[in-house]
Amino acid sequence: MGLLETTLAKIHPADRNARALAVAHQDRLTKPRGSLGALEDVAVRLAAAAGTCPAPLPVPAALAIFAADHGVHAQGVTPWPQEVTGQMVANFLAGGAVANAFAAQAGASVTVVDVGVATELPPGPGLVVRKVASGTADMTLGPAMTLDQARAAVETGITVAGDLVAAGARCLVTGDMGIANTTASAALICAFTGSDPARATGRGTGVDDATLTRKIETVRRALTVNGLPPDGAGDRPAGAAEALRLLAAVGGLEHAALAGFVLGGAAARVPVILDGVIAGSAALAAAAFSSAAADHCVAGHLSAEPGHAIALAHLGLTPLVDLGLRLGEGTGALLAYPLVAAAARVMHDVATFDSAGVTDKEAQAT
Ligand SMILES: O=C(O)c1ccc[n+]([C@@H]2O[C@H](COP(=O)([O-])O)[C@@H](O)[C@H]2O)c1
Ligand SMILES: Cc1cc2nc[nH]c2cc1C
């Protein structure tokens, strides 16, 4: 058995008992029942995922930004040159990106992983070099990755998650960097959900109408060339082998690593906050590897990219915030992190009606 299989064997689904305890505890806290809205659901999800009530505080948090390039860039699906991926990696390492600012604000550490950047990066402190390939192949001409490459990238994500948890992280935050990766994300969403490319494909960094039309056709061609008709997702066999095949066909190295990162967090029972459409499409792969993987995820935000809502609906996840972000890097997930931490802390710190001597209207009624 490889690392992927041993990790899948460790993943537990949400614990019903811990969930029931968490729901009951929420109702004993000194607040009107349900008054914390979506935060109550988060606290209950965290307890069910951890298998204990209350769930451990998700502190500290660790952001991992997986960076990679894409052969489909050659199809003209983005106005940005490919070398921007490597340049932004240097920016992350220098502390100059939005993700660095948001991580500093949230108190999260930042780890940058080169899982497949096409350009040479100057060696420097802080960069985790796990380059599986110098970018993927063009998915409109055949599979973007070999099965071995996809597996190596998934296992890289598992290892990074395991290393961060071993170093003390109690919340994992997904980040990505990869020029053209919204095209691969749309193709993955179509492959895993059966959605039509015209619905799942968006403007990414902000492409014009002509480029959007080309992008949709590129996604459609990639699916066809790889034997994945958009409306045929329901007919495909489920399971780990199929998850790896779809990732290899139309995914990116960062998507595969992010899928592994989710699996690694789930296996360690450490919650994973998902960022935008890249993380959402990678989580579809993680959920295909293990149906319990999504139990360990919190959807940080809703990206402006239309495929993201499709992916989250398929995963049964509700995004915490909707700010119209479409940056990636982990920025939306980092903004959601304090909400997740606050939701968990309520279960530890807030007094109950009994302990605080506050009259409960429910108790009065009975
Ligand atoms: O996270 C998102 O939902 C998101 C939406 C649009 C763009 N991005 C980021 O923009 C880059 C990809 O955009 P594009 O247009 O080159 O496919 C990549 O580095 C992503 O992190 C990210
Ligand atoms: C400048 C820039 C920063 C990014 N961060 C994530 N994706 C990005 C894409 C571009 C183009």
Image (cartoon, rainbow, N blue to C red):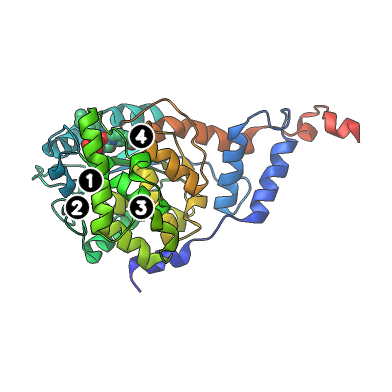
Q: Determine if residue 95 is in view.
A: no
Badge 2 or badge 4: first in the primary sequence: 2
Residue 250 point in image, percent of width and height: 27, 54
Q: Is disc 2 in contact with disc 3, using a CB cutoff of under 8 Å?
A: no
Badge 2 or badge 3: first in the primary sequence: 2
| 342 vs 241, nearest the viewer | 241
| Marks 4/3: CA–CA distance | 18 Å
Q: State the SS at label 2.
A: loop
Q: Is disc 2 in contact with disc 1, using a CB cutoff of under 8 Å?
A: yes
Residue 363 point in image, percent of width and height: 86, 34
| Marks 4/1: CA–CA distance | 17 Å
Q: Which mark is residue 359?
A: none
Label 4 CB sits under 8 Å from any ligand 1 atom: yes
Residue at the far bottom: name it.
1
What's the amino acid at mark 4? Glu
Question: In which image quadrant can residue 8 be found?
Answer: bottom left
Disc 1 packing (10 Å; few <14; some 14–19; many ≥20): many
Q: Quadrant of ligand 2?
A: top left
Disc 4 packing (10 Å; few <14; some 14–19; many ≥20): many
**Which marked residue is nearer to the observer: mark 4 or mark 1?**
1
Q: Which residue is mark 1?
A: 218
Q: Which residue is mark 2?
A: 140
Q: Which mark is residue 305?
A: 4
Residue at point 58% right, 34% down? 39
Q: Which residue is mark 3?
A: 230
